[in-house]
Image (cartoon, rainbow, N blue to C red):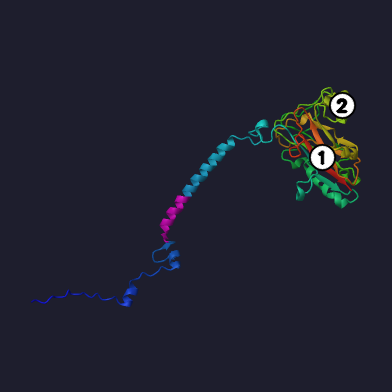
């Protein structure tokens, strides 16, 4: 009987430890990745490769910048620097001008409308007179406003400004409400300045007939208009202004009020067309003898057919509200 032969086994020699270690790739040091002097690469790329990438991005961003510049140029060709694209009813401002007052409370309390000071303390009321100084600086120094100086025209009701000219606003005609007189704050009889907010192209429709005045217009303003109609009928094209106490107690405490240089904004300042050097006309309201030590709520209104009034405190269309308190 033949003997069975066991299958031959092949023994594979295990690799030596040293040979196995040599076969593992060596890690590339980070500094060699930054710059490899043997291969002449920076961050794994040759100078030629980096040059191609640089040229690509220079060309790409140059073309992109040129496209943006062309788009902006075309866009600005559709705009006029002085004439707004959307006007009157199409604009966010609308067609009803608001009324503003100066001086305003400090920026720390922007929501406040209270003018509160002590008339016998110069340091106390100086904050308010300084605020008026800053506000009136443009009116006092014509050259400070771009284009203003050479194109100022002394307008009158029968002498509107020629094309390209703007009407002068002479603040020396404001009676006691002047810088030299501290705007009368030191006498506890302060002056408040009113301005009608600018709306491009807005033309006021005047109450220029005393027989056709609104029923809610204050009686003293009606009398004033009637007197002007009789004595100075050429001045009737005016946006009239009234200031009065809001409540019965305020009316009692507010005292006499005078307006300088007149009781309203003359019609020759309108329409506003963003002419170079234009400044809004002002009305200085002089509170001659307000009761001291009590808050007086004051409401001022502008009057024209196309100036709407709204009693909503947030809107205040055609009017402005503020409080006076003099210690």
Instruction: Indicate the position of residue 6 as horizontal and vertical percent values.
Output: 16, 75
Few, some or many C-alpha atoms within 10 Å of disc 2 (few <14, some 14-19, many ≥20)?
some
Q: Main secondary structure of the magenta part?
A: helix
State the residue at coordinates (86%, 51%).
124
- The image quadrant that residue 133 belongs to is top right
Q: Secondary structure at mark 1?
A: strand
Screen quadrant of the N terminus: bottom left
Which residues are the magenta region? 44-57
Q: Residue 193 has which mark?
A: 1
Q: Is residue 311 magenta?
A: no
Direction top: furthest residue:
211
Q: Work out whether 134 lies above or below 168.
A: below
Front residue of this view, candidates 30 and 255: 255
Q: Position of residue 142 (x, y in %)?
A: 77, 40
User: Of the residues under marks 2 and 1, which one precedes in the sequence?
Assistant: 1
Task: Give the CA distance from mark 2 to mark 1.
Answer: 22 Å
Q: Hey, which quadrant is residue 187 in on the image?
A: top right
**265 or 244, which lies in front?**
244
Q: Residues within 10 Å of mark 1 (few under 14, many from 20)?
A: some
Horizontal side, residue 92 vs residue 4: left or right: right
* Location of residue 184 by image quarter: top right
Give the percent coordinates (x, y) of residue 10.
21, 74
Q: Residue at x 88, y 36 (%)?
A: 258
Q: Can you identify the residue that label 2 sits on?
A: 228
- Depth check, front residue: 13 or 226: 13
**Tag shown at residue 104:** none
């Amino acid at each position: 009987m033949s003997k069975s032969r066991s299958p031959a086994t092949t023994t594979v020699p295990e690799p030596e430890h040293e040979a196995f270690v040599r076969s593992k790739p060596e890690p590339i040091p980070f500094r060699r990745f930054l710059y490899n002097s043997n291969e002449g690469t920076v961050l794994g790329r040759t100078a030629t490769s980096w040059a191609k990438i640089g040229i690509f991005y220079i060309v790409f961003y140059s073309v992109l910048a040129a496209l943006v510049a062309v788009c902006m140029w075309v866009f600005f060709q559709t705009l006029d620097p002085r004439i707004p694209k959307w006007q009157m009813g199409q604009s966010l401002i609308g067609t009803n001008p608001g009324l503003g007052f100066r001086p305003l409370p400090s920026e720390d309390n922007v929501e406040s409308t209270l003018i509160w000071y002590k008339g016998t303390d110069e340091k106390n009321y100086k904050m308010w007179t300084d605020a008026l100084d800053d506000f009136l600086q443009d009116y006092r120094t014509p050259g400070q406003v771009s284009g203003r100086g050479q194109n100022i025209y002394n307008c009158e009701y029968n002498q509107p400004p020629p094309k390209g000219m703007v009407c002068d606003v002479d603040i020396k005609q404001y009676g006691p409400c002047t810088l030299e007189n501290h705007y009368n704050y030191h006498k506890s009889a302060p002056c408040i300045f009113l301005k009608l907010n600018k709306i491009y192209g807005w033309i006021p429709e005047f109450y220029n007939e005393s027989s056709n005045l609104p029923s809610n217009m204050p009686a003293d303003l009606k009398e004033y208009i009637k007197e002007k109609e009789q004595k100075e009928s050429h001045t009737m094209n005016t946006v009239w202004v009234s200031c009065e106490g809001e409540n019965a107690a305020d009316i009692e405490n507010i005292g006499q009020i005078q307006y300088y240089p007149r009781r309203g904004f003359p019609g020759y300042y309108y329409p506003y067309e963003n002419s170079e050097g234009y400044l809004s006309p002002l009305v200085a309201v002089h509170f001659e003898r307000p009761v001291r030590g009590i808050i007086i709520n004051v409401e001022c209104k502008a009057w024209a057919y196309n100036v709407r009034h709204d009693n909503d405190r947030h809107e205040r269309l055609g009017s402005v509200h503020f409080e006076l308190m003099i210690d």
